[in-house]
Image (cartoon, helix red, strand yellow):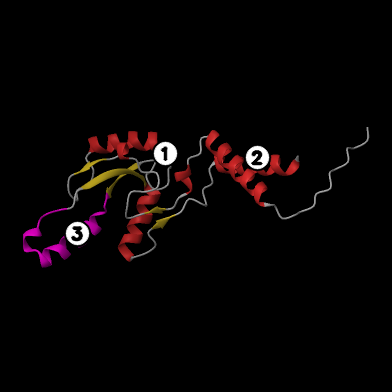
């Protein structure tokens, strides 16, 4: 048979109503496919990340590393909730002190200079599950004063990509 004629595509600037429909359809598709809006936020490496949940942290006792029992708990949290900075759920786990030890030590030293009774008092910390990649980035950033922001743009998730493609296809094909 004869090939079907292809529709003639012409670009035009979308109007306000079309942009609102695109945005609403994109957000609904993204959510329906399991995407979470926190997955597109940047994470500050010196604080609890965009994927942090209160239920996915445990108390840390001072500057020491996580014990084997704590690491086992953190590994379960990593598998269930993901790294608190990037959301990755695979690989080994690191018990991430939040706030970081270096931040607590600097704050304690500053406070004890002005308030002598403050010496020896530590700010409470918690362990959050962290992947080794984010741990390396955090260590480098805190050690040399580098960027403390972890973005997620280079690791697109399926819900984002499928949601964008679906909305563009549906809204601009029919």
- Name the residue nearer the viewer: 62 or 43: 43
Marks 1 and 2: in contact by CB < 8 Å?
no
Q: Which residue matches tag 2?
A: 166
Q: Nearer the viewer, mark 2 or mark 1?
A: 2
Q: Which residue matches tag 3?
A: 105
Q: Is residue 131 above or below residue 111?
A: above
Is 17 positioned to the left or the right of 43 in the image? Answer: right
Where residue 81 sits, quadrant-wise, is top left
Badge 1 marks a residue whose secondary structure is loop
- N-term-proximal mark, 2 vs 3: 3
Q: Is residue 102 above or below residue 73?
A: below
Q: Nearer the viewer, mark 2 or mark 3?
A: 2
- Residue 107 magenta: yes
Residue 89: mark: 1
Q: Residue at x 38, y 55 (%)?
A: 137
Q: Which residues are magenta?
A: 98-122
Badge 2 marks a residue whose secondary structure is helix
Visible residue check, residue 119: no
Dominant SS in magenta: helix
Q: Residue at x 88, y 41 (%)?
A: 5
Is 142 positioned to the left or the right of 59 in the image? Answer: right
């Amino acid at each position: 048979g004869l090939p079907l004629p292809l529709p003639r595509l012409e670009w035009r600037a979308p109007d306000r109503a079309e942009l609102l429909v695109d945005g609403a359809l994109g957000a609904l598709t993204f959510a329906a496919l399991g995407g979470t809006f926190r997955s597109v936020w940047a994470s500050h490496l010196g604080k609890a990340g965009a994927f942090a949940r209160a239920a996915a942290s445990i108390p840390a006792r001072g500057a020491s590393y996580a014990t084997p029992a704590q690491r086992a708990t953190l590994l379960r949290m990593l598998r269930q909730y993901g790294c608190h900075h990037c959301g990755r759920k695979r690989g080994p786990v690191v018990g991430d002190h939040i706030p970081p030890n270096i931040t607590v030590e600097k704050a304690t030293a500053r406070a004890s200079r002005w308030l002598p009774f403050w010496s020896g008092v530590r700010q409470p910390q918690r362990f959050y599950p962290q992947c080794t990649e984010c741990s390396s980035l955090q260590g480098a950033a805190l050690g040399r004063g580098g960027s403390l922001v972890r973005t997620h743009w280079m690791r697109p998730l399926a819900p984002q990509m499928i949601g964008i493609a679906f909305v563009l296809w549906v809204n601009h094909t029919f």
